Amino acid sequence: MKITSIHLFQHDLPVADGPYVMSSGPVWALDTTLVAIGLENGVVGWGETCPLGPTYAPAHAKGARVALELLAPALIGASVRSPRALQRRMDATLAGHAYAKAALEVGAYDALGQSLGLRVVDLLGGAVCEAVPAYFAISVGAPDDMAREAAERVQEGYQRLQLKVGGRPLEVDIEAAHRVQEAVGPSVRLVLDANRGLTPADAVQLSQALRDGALTLEQPCCTLRELAQARPRLCHPLYMDESAVDLATMVSAAGQGLVDGFGLKLTRMGGLGPMAAARDICRAAGLRHTCDDSWGGDIVAAACVQVAASVAPEQLDGVWIAQPHIEGHYDAENGVRAEEGHIKLPSGPGLGLNIDPEQFGAPVAAYD
Ligand SMILES: [Mg+2]
């Protein structure tokens, strides 16, 4: 199961019903990077990393490719039999840059699974379900528009909705939350995600103004210190997303009781192995979490669903994939889709995708 080639591809993912709007502004298209890991046995495993523009996180598409140009040659000749050994090899080559390493790590898991005839979820402990609950993120918009879309998404089958807030007067976000609550009723889980866009004082004001609603606040403020500052005066459960940059931060936050759950991002954490470790930390700490990524096509979506299917249902808060916002699939037949509020676990080995590299054109870099 030795790696004999690694090819890097660049691909543009347009936001089909764009823009996607967060507190930091609109996003119209995403620059994604794909890696194809070829093994001596003829198997090809695929990985992907797709930062959500250059300002969502300390990650950007060109940075991923430059990092991958350093990392890929270091893996030629290594075996995918031990993804952790590959991780150590990458860490010995480049510090940090988990979002780039994740593409190679996911590609290695895909190749390993295909070689063994096992799904990636089986390599992560086994599936507890064959479909996972999806959630939908509603962009910052006029309160009436957000309420209308929320009602439509609930009709489609979503039982958890995330409302993007922040980047505008607090009163408008408060009104939007009220309108959405009226539109969907109490049985739908609502999460207000400010993507770091609020001050601690504004987060507290937002929470206290909505104190009667069964809501969750996700990453209202930018830093750990700001989250800790707001936490004692919040009226709702607090989830950490962008600040959960690694396992050490998660362990510390869980141990201090700083948060009630996590929004976990596959590439930010460094891939499937760290996601499985994060799953187990949350299990031990009694915390719920999502399994998502910042953005990405079928490869990222399949990886998220594979790890999510290994999470106990009472612990899994849902899975977000970019597919509802993207035209087309890398694999027309097995592409990952949210349908009626759920996402089916692909049935094939590895990630469960069959990808034709021709669709991405010539590789931007190739190592053989
Ligand atoms: Mg979030």
Image: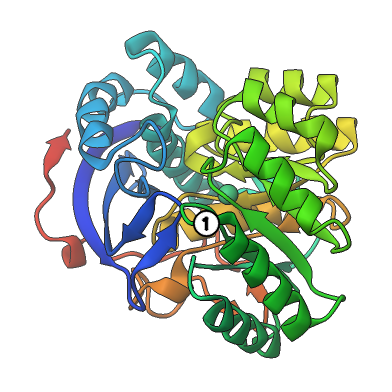
What residue lies at 26% left-to-right and 42% top-to-bottom?
61
**Image location (x, y in percent) of residue 19:** 34, 69
> Which of the two residues, 32 or 150, is positioned nearer the viewer here?
150
**89 in relation to 137, above or below:** above
What residue lies at 79% left-to-right and 30% top-to-bottom?
281
- In the picture, measured across the screen, residue 111 lies left or right of residue 264, that is left
What residue lies at 34% left-to-right and 73% top-to-bottom?
18
**Image location (x, y in percent) of residue 351:** 51, 56
Q: Residues within 10 Å of mark 1 (few under 14, many from 20)?
A: few
Residue type at mark 1 is: Pro
Residue, disc 1: 169
**294 in relation to 346, above or below:** above
> Which of the two residues, 257 or 334, is positioned nearer the viewer here?
257
Task: Tell me the quadrant of the picture where the C terminus can be found.
Answer: top left
**Image location (x, y in percent) of residue 280:** 79, 34
**178 in relation to 46, above or below:** below
Task: Tell me the quadrant of the picture where the N terminus can be found.
Answer: top left
